[in-house]
Image: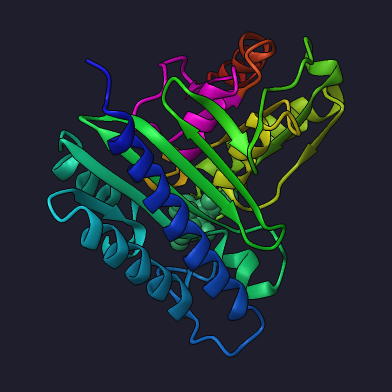
Amino acid sequence: MNEPIVGSKSFAAVAINCASKAGEWIQSKLGAYQTLKEKQSPHDLVTEVDRGSEKLIRSLIMMNFPDHSFLGEEGVEPGPAASAQALEDVRDAEYLWIVDPVDGTTNFVHGFPFFTVSIALARRGEVILGVVYDPSADELFIAEKGKGAYVHGKRMSVSGEETLRTSLLATGFPAEHREALPRNLAQLQRLAPQVRNIRSGGSAALHLAYVAAGRLSGFWEVGLSSWDIAAGALLVQEAGGRIGDQDGTPYHLGVRDVLATNGRIHGELQAELAFLASD
Ligand code: 2AM
Ligand code: CA
Ligand code: CA
Ligand code: CA
């Protein structure tokens, strides 16, 4: 049976309210004094704004839906093992909110306007709602399962490029993952001459929203966590694109090495990435 309209509307309303309140607050803190901490290395930063944003979102969600589960980046110890375990602990929950309170903390700290609030709701492991809010541009991207993807009320669809040659791609540098960085750089070196160009904005969630909006033809990155991808994954799917693991597995909450495209270039790009991985 379908979800009652009222129920799903109120999920979206709460997610939008959380994302815009948190986003507005984050934006007000831009350039203000931040207590900056390195989590595990100079590449992995956290500020009081990450923690404050998560607290705000969490309390609004729990107030509205006290029996729902919640997974947020700042409630989890740093490192891939801890984030995988934290997901395993809750992944089959009836309703699970998956939240990245600031995606692109490095950008936020440097005043580079490419960071977002990312909020997803999964029902028994399947993402049914995704909101990505970019406060710098005041753009709110939203998708509900089966209902399409929208930016500020306008329906989004992925871009039309059929080949890598005409594609604009984005990636993220795995500065943290020492063994992954050489692979990522080799991928860049191989792909750069074959595509129109490559960008690296520093927010996985916003890159995914841009794939959904048709502003990027594709995006790949390694070593991400569920909260970086969940909301953006539904945006891409509902905008007619394709998302999954770089090995070809369709998207699920545990995907870390992500590949998202307009669908048309997926096979070609996946083959390039796979070829490199097996070098
Ligand atoms: P963050 O800003 O929420 O930490 C940039 O390439 C992307 O990688 C961002 O989405 C960023 O999310 C994420 N990221 C940053 N540091 C990371 C780390 N140590 N491990 C995994 N992902 C990270
Ligand atoms: Ca982080
Ligand atoms: Ca993130
Ligand atoms: Ca974050």
> Would you say residue 276 sits in the magenta stretch?
no
**Is residue 200 visible in this depiction of the protein?**
yes
Q: Give residue 5's position: percent from left, percent from top.
A: 33, 30
**Is residue 176 visible in this depiction of the protein?**
no
Task: State the residue at coordinates (58%, 90%).
Answer: 33
User: Which image quarter holds the N terminus?
Assistant: top left
Compared across the picture, whether 41 is left or right of 184 comes to left
User: Which image quarter holds the C terminus?
Assistant: top right
Task: State the residue at coordinates (31%, 64%).
Answer: 60
Determine whether 235 is above or below 78 in the image. above
Determine whether 222 is above or below 259 in the image. below
Task: State the residue at coordinates (56%, 30%).
Answer: 149
Query: Which contiguous range is marked in magenta?
Result: 231-260
Q: Give residue 189's position: percent from left, percent from top.
A: 76, 33
Determine whether 264 is above or below 69 in the image. above
Q: Quadrant of residue 27?
A: bottom right
Q: Which of the pair 42/83 is nearer the observer?
A: 83
Q: Quadrant of residue 108?
A: bottom right
Q: Residue furthest bottom?
A: 33
Q: Which of the pair 61/9 is nearer the observer?
A: 9
Q: Give residue 111's position: percent from left, percent from top.
A: 70, 72
